Image: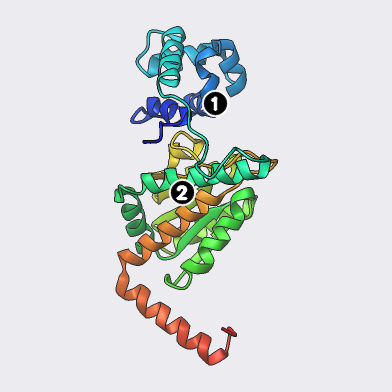
Amino acid sequence: MTPVAPTDRVLDLFHGVRLTPTQRRIAHSLVQHAASAGYLSAAEVAELARVSQPSVTRFAMALGYDGYPALRRRLREIVAGGGAVPAPASGPAGNELQRAVRAEVDNLHQLAEQLADLGRVTAAGELLAASRPLPVLGLRAAAPLAAYFAYFAAKVHPDVRVLDTGGSLLADRLEQARAAGASALLAIVLPRYPREALDALREARAAGMSVVAITDSPVSPAAEYAEIVLPAAVGAQLVFDLHTAPMALAMAVLQAICDAAPADAQRRLEEFEQSATRRQLFVG
């Protein structure tokens, strides 16, 4: 059995705990520095998370500890007790690019284990399938993923609207979707988390829409505004992030949308294929 990675063991500390946005920033910083988390002072954690040192103390108490020293002892215990993750069976660690790709493989394995429980994905599919129209939010780094999802979702859903630009137009388009009957929003929110994306989630919830968030961690800032949080780790080994697992999760959500209304999905797919054949869209 593969030992649990330090990141996962630290993340387990926060499951089921309702954290404030500031506390989520602290938790996210500890997850990002899982291997050394148990050796950081409160001041160092505060600097990493860009919060005050008293906020770190309050964070530890929110988790049920007397103060940060007690939490730090626990962090040392869980990191030291889990052992190291072995090198891949395929051979040595390899060069930087190989390590980055292997880390993405690990992220996909983690996502596969997470999907053993289909409850949240199934619930997300039902919410999104019922929304007419279906707005899909993705700003900055998440914009290509939102467009990729929407391209395929439009084949099985009658009205998919991509929200991939910020500014005042984003609020306009969100209001228009709600006025047209949208009951749910799919938001893809990835590091570095755009402030406009979080503002849009806040506005969507205030307007009565359910929010399904695909994000990199259960303690990401998007979690505060989402009814259903679907995490998928982002690769951070290269200069720019790798989004392999979030893209796979997005397509799993689309599968859940199809499963929520299989007859409608099949009918729309058949109609598209007939249209594609008539217009000779593809050569193969």
Q: Quadrant of the image for the N terminus?
A: top left
Residue 254: percent from the left, percent from the top? 42, 61
Tell whether 149 sits left or right of 144.
Answer: left
Residue 38: percent from the left, percent from the top? 50, 15
Tell whether 33 sits left or right of 231.
Answer: right
Label at residue 270: none
**How many C-alpha atoms fall within 10 Å of the one at disc 2: few (<14), some, or many (≥20)?**
many
Q: Nearer the viewer, residue 39 or 28?
A: 39
Please say if 6 is above or below 273: above
Q: Quadrant of residue 271?
A: bottom left
Q: Residue at x 46, y 33 (%)?
A: 219
Q: Residue at x 49, y 40 (%)?
A: 222
Tell whether 27 sits left or right of 92.
Answer: left
Q: Amino acid at mark 2?
A: Ala
Q: State the SS at label 2.
A: helix
Q: State the SS at label 1.
A: helix
Q: Nearer the viewer, residue 241 or 54?
A: 241
Label at residue 204: 2
Q: Amino acid at mark 1?
A: Ser
Q: In this figure, what is the number of numbered marks?
A: 2
Location of mark 1 (residue): 29
Q: Is residue 80 among what the camera can see?
A: yes
- Separation of marks 2 and 1 at Cα, in angstroms: 27 Å
Choose mark 2 or mark 1, whichever is in front: 1
Residue 125: percent from the left, percent from the top? 36, 58
Residue 177: percent from the left, percent from the top? 48, 61
